[in-house]
Image (cartoon, grey):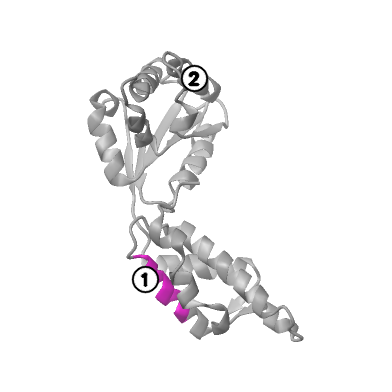
Amino acid sequence: MIFEGNPGTGKTTIARLLTGILYNLEYIPQYKYTEVTAKDLIASYVGQTSGKTYGVIRNALGGVLFIDEAYSLLSYDGENSFGEESLATIIKAMEDYRDRLVIIFAGYKNEMENFIKRNPGMLSRVGYKMEFKDYSIEELMEIFIKLVEQNNMTITEDALSSVKDIVNSAMRIENFGNARYIHNLFQKIIIEHAKNNEDTVDESNLYEISRIDINNEKLLSNDDVYHHKIGFV
């Protein structure tokens, strides 16, 4: 399978859930989920990559092998073609162990499209391609509200409005983290809330997020949000 989409759209979560579904339907013999990236498949020296990749595949047999940011293998295609060696091993395993292993390649949409074009032999062996679309602002706010409720807290209307403004602005950033961004944002707000209530005498304040806990300028100037890609978990 191929899972393509931006960070935080649920690729890893769905892969883990799918492992349970396939096991319960007896398509795979073990309830086993193995998650790797390119660095787990590529060796340091010529001739060792095939063995390292095969070792990962062998350990994943019977379950689901999830290769995150699969297109990163192409970055190893220098003069020694480590990436090609790994891919050749994977493609052969897809044929040899088709009844014992499910392989999911995942990553950003554009990069995954290029990855597939570079490997025509792989496309013929992939049965399903799923696109994970970005969440809407309404869905993201629903996720945020659920986080508030799950932590036995409440949030004032003006605080929630400020959160929505922040999320609206963040959504325009390249490689926006979707649900992962919301989780990180919630954690930052909780930390600010704890600081603001360090000396409170009213216990009810401990469980209510208010406008004072939402520092728009601080949250929107976060370098991690604006300048770095948010990776997969």
Quarter containing the N terminus: top left
Residue 1 seen in the current view: no
Q: Is 32 above or below relative to 98? A: below
Instruction: Name the residue tied to disc 1.
Output: 169
Disc 1 on helix, strand or loop?
helix
Q: Residue at x 60, y 73 (%)?
A: 192
Q: Is residue 90 left or right of residue 193?
A: left
Judge whether residue 85 is colored magenta.
no
The stretch of residues the image draws in magenta is 161-171
- Residue 194 horizontal/vertical position (percent): 67, 74
Amino acid under label 2?
Lys
Task: Give the image location of residue 212, x and y in percent.
Answer: 56, 83
Count neighbours of disc 2 (C-alpha within 10 A) and say few if under 14, some if 14 to 19, many if 20 or more.
Answer: some
Please name the residue shown 60% across and 77% down the image. Answer: 154
Type of secondary structure dominating the magenta stretch: helix
Q: Which residue is mark 2?
A: 52
State the CA–CA distance, disc 1 to disc 2.
43 Å
Is residue 47 or residue 130 the one in the foreground? 47
Return the x and y of residue 148 as percentages of the image width and height.
58, 70
